[in-house]
Amino acid sequence: MRVLAAMSGGVDSAVAAARAVAAGHDVVGVHLALSQAPGTLRTGSRGCCSREDAGDARRAADVLGIPFYVWDFADRFKAEVIDDFIESYANGQTPNPCLRCNEKIKFAALADRAIALGFDAVATGHYARLQGGVLRRAVDAEKDQSYVLGVLSAQQLSRAMFPVGDTPKEQIRAEAAARGLAVANKPDSHDICFIPSGDTRAFLGARIGVRAGAVVDAETGTVLAEHEGVHGFTIGQRKGLGLPGPARDGKPRYVTDIDPETATVRVGTADRLQVWAIQADRAIWTSGAAPGGPVECVVQVRAHGGTAEAVAEAVDDGIVIRLREPLTGVARGQAAVLYLPDPDGDVVLGSGTIADTDHRR
């Protein structure tokens, strides 16, 4: 097969490309230039898409002996990922930009161009397994990225390859070193790539501006503080609430609700965070078809953690998810990814974007 290897400049994508070459595929490496103003160097493990990353990707391609190109997707990335991120926070939601990047850039814009140029598949360094068109969790549970791939359609999965998903990360680094890849010990990036400072509130504040509102006690309706914008908050947040002091009962307070229309942020005790049902829209089913009725599954609402047994049912273009046990910190804008337990590794059934939650048991 002709395979386009998306090379970020990190160890995972370099080994993914190497494995595609070793498997006998005709491989071409490509680095996506996603930043409109790339920095010269990254800071430790913060951020990505820097000139340093592009250089690391090129050197890895040279070691592998494959052609290498840099494709400029900066404008598309800004429109589809960054602007969406900003707008979502302004609307009181909590988006996952990595998930949106996979959906809109790596497996839509990139894959579309790859197919148009005659490639059969796109290989990436994501930790997930794809077996016979079935998307599964990675062998390395700590590195599993199936959650951020849960938005991919059956068509997108049909032209994807995840060569490293069957191997623990430690072994991937060892393999990189054995292959002579200089990125073998390069730190993983762990922040939002377009916010290398790690200060999400400052990034959003500079772009959204001041939209003052009140922080209100969810139980009494008492105004406890003022804030400069709902973009500074997310459901389940405990710190940085701007409260003048501890509550009378001494219990910590969390963000329990965000109303972007009135710019009201409600705070309350931990028990007010418990969610027993989720309404999600923009349903995507990895098999290409929705299940015919209610299905027992496990739902995950955050990239790391936030899982519970549930019963999910397709309703129109969305999903109604009833939990067997409560989840906390469930925010609108996050993805609800559904898994089917399987002896060979959990299977991704589909996903939806969380639109509403119900705290009633």
Image (tube, rainbow, N blue to C red):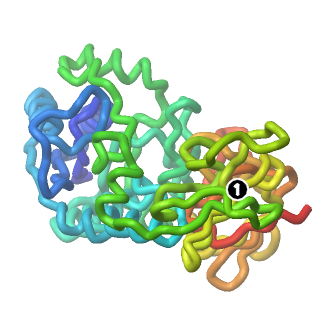
Left/right placement of residue 274 relative to residue 61 reads: right
Q: Residue at the far right: name it.
A: 361
Residue nearest the viewer, comparing 153 with 352: 352
Residue 161: x and y in percent read 38, 49
Which residue is label 1 attached to?
267
Residue 241 versus residue 31: which sits nearer the camera? 241
Residue 222 position by quadrant:
bottom right
Residue at 62% in and 46% down: 244
Seen in the image, is 39 located left or right of residue 157? left
Query: Percent position (x, y) of residue 249?
Result: 84, 41
Name the residue: 35% across, 66% down. 209
Q: Is residue 4 visible?
A: yes
Q: Residues within 10 Å of mark 1 (few under 14, many from 20)?
A: many
Residue 139 x/y as whole percent = 56, 32
Residue lying farthest front? 244
Q: Quadrant of the C terminus?
A: bottom right
Q: Position of residue 36 (x, y in %)?
A: 14, 57
Any part of residue 296 in sight: no
